[in-house]
Every structure is written in C-alpha cells, then in structure tokens.
Image (spheres, helix red, strand yellow):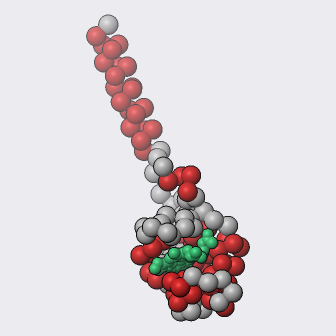
C-alpha cells in the first residue's frame, strides 16, 4: 500500500510539473508580434495627458471625464473639436493645440483600448 501511495504521489508530482511546463510555449513556437499583444502602441504625446487622464483614461483630477474605453471615433472627434475651438474647455483647447492629426489618431486609439469606467471598481 505504501508503495502504491508513493507511486501515485510521484505520478501526481510529475503531472503537476508537466502541466506547469505547458504554460510556457514550446521553444521555436511563433511569437505574436508586439502589435497583436498590445492593440495600441503608446502614443508619443501620451505624456501630455497623464496628469489629468492617467495612462489608462481613469481621471486623476476632479472634473476630468473618464475617457478609457470610450469609442475611438468619439475621442477623435472630441480632440478635433477642442483643437479647432468648436468645443470649448480651457485646458483641452490649449493642450490639443500641441497635437498633430496623427497624435489625435494615436491618442484616440490608445484611450479607446483602455478599460471603461465599469471595469474600474
Ligand atoms: C489639465 C488637465 C487635463 C489634461 C492635461 C488633459 N485633459 Fe483632457 N480633459 C480635461 C477636462 C477637465 C476635460 C473636460 C472638458 C470639457 O468639459 O469639455 C477633458 C476632456 C477630454 C476629452 C473629452 C471627453 C468627453 O467625454 O467628451 C478628451 C477626449 C480628452 N480630454 C483627451 C485628452 C488627451 C488625449 C489629452 C492629452 C493630449 C488630454 N485630454 C489632456 C482635462 C485634461
């Protein structure tokens, strides 16, 4: 009986080890390109936004809206409107002036890919 228990323990341990080993991909397996692992590369101008919106779009300052997980098209439109002055908010009018069209696209894609407000709890 002791021998059986020992054999079972050894079998269990080796099963456990092989299960662990399977969590890392076998050598030489194709790796996903970085772009697939994170859907949006970090925008060059993200540093202009983080003081108020954080990296993930959850507000760090009172009165700042949550923009993480918002639709990309909406974010792009909002940034363009701040930039051309058709939407007025002192901070955003000033900041969006520094953005090129390409920055607006990158930032909208980035924040759209972050968790929405419901995921924050
Ligand atoms: C000084 C703080 C501050 C910084 C820095 C800042 N924002 Fe804002 N942002 C705000 C505030 C406050 C609002 C709300 C303005 C309003 O009432 O329209 C806002 C609104 C927005 C909105 C509209 C959200 C909505 O729901 O309509 C977007 C999009 C946005 N910001 C993106 C950005 C991006 C991208 C950056 C960096 C380039 C940035 N913000 C930098 C404070 C900031």
User: Position of 82 compared to 47: left or right?
Assistant: right
Q: Position of residue 68 (x, y in %)?
A: 56, 65
Q: Is residue 105 above or below residue 66?
A: below
What residue is drawn where x is 61% and y is 84%?
A: 88
Q: Position of residue 107 (x, y in %)?
A: 57, 78
Q: Is residue 101 visible?
A: no
| Picture quadrant where residue 35 is located | bottom right
What residue is drawn where x is 43% and y is 69%?
A: 61
User: Position of 9 compared to 22: left or right?
Assistant: left
Q: Is residue 95 visible?
A: yes
Q: Is residue 107 above or below residue 37?
A: below
Q: Which quadrant does the N terminus fall into?
A: top left
What residue is drawn where x is 35% and y is 13%?
A: 4
Count the labels in the image: 0
Q: Is residue 99 above or below residue 31?
A: below
| Picture quadrant where residue 32 is located | bottom right
| Picture quadrant where residue 17 is located | top left
Of residue 24 and residue 68, the one placed in the foreground of this image is: 68
Q: Position of residue 30 (x, y in %)?
A: 56, 62
User: Position of 58 compared to 36: left or right?
Assistant: left
Q: Is residue 38 above or below residue 20?
A: below
Q: Which quadrant of the frame does ligand 1 lie within?
A: bottom right
Of residue 81 and residue 98, the one placed in the foreground of this image is: 81
Of residue 31 and residue 102, the one placed in the foreground of this image is: 102
User: Position of 117 compared to 27: left or right?
Assistant: right
Residue most toward the left?
2
Of residue 84 and residue 7, the one placed in the foreground of this image is: 84
Q: Position of residue 2 (x, y in %)?
A: 28, 10
What residue is drawn where x is 45% and y is 38%?
A: 19
């Amino acid at each position: 009986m002791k021998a059986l228990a020992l054999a079972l323990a050894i079998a269990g341990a080796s099963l456990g080890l092989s299960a662990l080993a399977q969590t890392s991909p076998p050598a030489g397996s194709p790796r996903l390109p970085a772009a697939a692992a994170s859907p949006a590369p970090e925008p060059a101008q993200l540093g202009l936004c983080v003081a108020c919106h954080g990296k993930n779009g959850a507000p760090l300052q009172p009165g700042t809206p949550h923009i993480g997980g918002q639709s990309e098209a909406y974010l792009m439109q909002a940034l363009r409107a701040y930039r051309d002055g058709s939407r007025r908010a002192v901070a955003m009018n000033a900041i969006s002036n520094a953005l090129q069209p390409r920055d607006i696209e990158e930032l909208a894609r980035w924040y759209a890919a972050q968790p929405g407000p419901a995921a924050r709890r």
